[in-house]
Image (tube, rainbow, N blue to C red):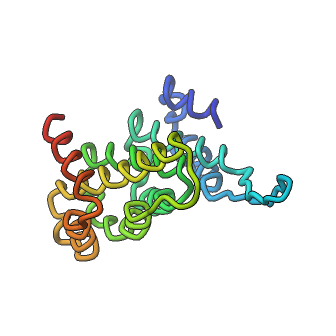
């Protein structure tokens, strides 16, 4: 997977030769399968049990390949197939979500019109992260990591509201208004608004 990402990054033309080309006919179908993989198992750690997903590195690598395709050979990626994958990634575990946030933000500048119809499908996973609360005993570094995760989801939402036509997507429009009027999120929203104005 990492070799594929390296080739797409440094030598995308190698995969785009011919019709149909290797990227569209062979590589991307495999990546679409890889990004769906989940291999969860329960590991016992003394009196505790933890769920481990052995496929997490594979999903993370697959999403990286998609992100590299968007930057280096965007025409090879069918967004109508990719955007449902992105919506699913927004509801995955923290590492995958953060990757997905960056990809959404990139698309908001490169292909904003393609995102509009997908906005409503982003709402549920984004809302779940934005409304997340810190539960149980957490170290300061754990709290900081969770707060950055929440902030990333809110930043993504605020950036999406700037896309022309986003207010025509009823579910997303209502959600984005809820984020802006939620007193618990007011400080973060204000901070991000200022940050986005200066960028």
Q: Residue at x 82, y 56 (%)?
A: 43
- From the image, which quarter does the C terminus lie in? top left
Comparing 88 with 183, the one in front is: 183
The outermost residue toward the bottom is 170
Hey, which quadrant is residue 160 in on the image? bottom left
Q: Residue at x 46, y 58 (%)?
A: 90
The percent coordinates of residue 23 (x first, y second) are 54, 41
Q: Is residue 39 left or right of residue 163?
A: right
The percent coordinates of residue 109 (x first, y second) are 24, 44
The percent coordinates of residue 113 (x first, y second) are 23, 56
Q: Is residue 83 left or right of residue 6?
A: left
Comparing 162 with 68, the one in front is: 162
The outermost residue toward the top is 10
Is 100 rendered above or below residue 65?
below
Q: Is residue 49 left or right of residue 155?
A: right
The percent coordinates of residue 77 (x first, y second) are 44, 48
Q: Is residue 94 left or right of residue 196?
A: right
Q: Residue at x 50, y 62 (%)?
A: 91
Hey, which quadrant is residue 136 in on the image? bottom right
Comparing 112 with 127, the one in front is: 127
Comparing 17 with 73, the one in front is: 73
């Amino acid at each position: 997977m990492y070799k594929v990402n390296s080739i797409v990054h440094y030598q995308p033309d190698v995969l785009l030769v011919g019709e149909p080309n290797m990227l569209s006919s062979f590589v991307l179908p495999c990546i679409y399968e890889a990004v769906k993989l989940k291999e969860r198992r329960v590991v016992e750690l003394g009196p505790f049990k933890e769920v481990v997903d052995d496929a997490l590195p594979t999903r993370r690598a697959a999403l990286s390949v998609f992100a590299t395709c968007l930057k280096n050979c965007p025409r090879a990626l069918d967004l109508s197939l990719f955007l449902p994958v992105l919506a699913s990634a927004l509801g995955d575990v923290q590492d995958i979500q953060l990757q997905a946030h960056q990809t959404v933000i990139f698309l908001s500048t490169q292909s904003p019109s393609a995102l509009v119809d997908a906005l409503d499908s982003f709402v549920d996973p984004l809302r779940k992260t934005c409304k997340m609360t810190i539960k149980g005993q957490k170290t300061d570094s754990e709290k900081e990591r969770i707060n950055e995760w929440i902030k990333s989801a809110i930043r993504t939402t605020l950036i999406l509201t700037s896309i022309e036509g986003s207010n025509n997507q009823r579910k997303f429009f209502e959600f984005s208004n809820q984020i802006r009027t939620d007193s618990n999120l007011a400080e973060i929203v204000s901070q991000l608004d200022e940050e986005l104005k200066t960028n």
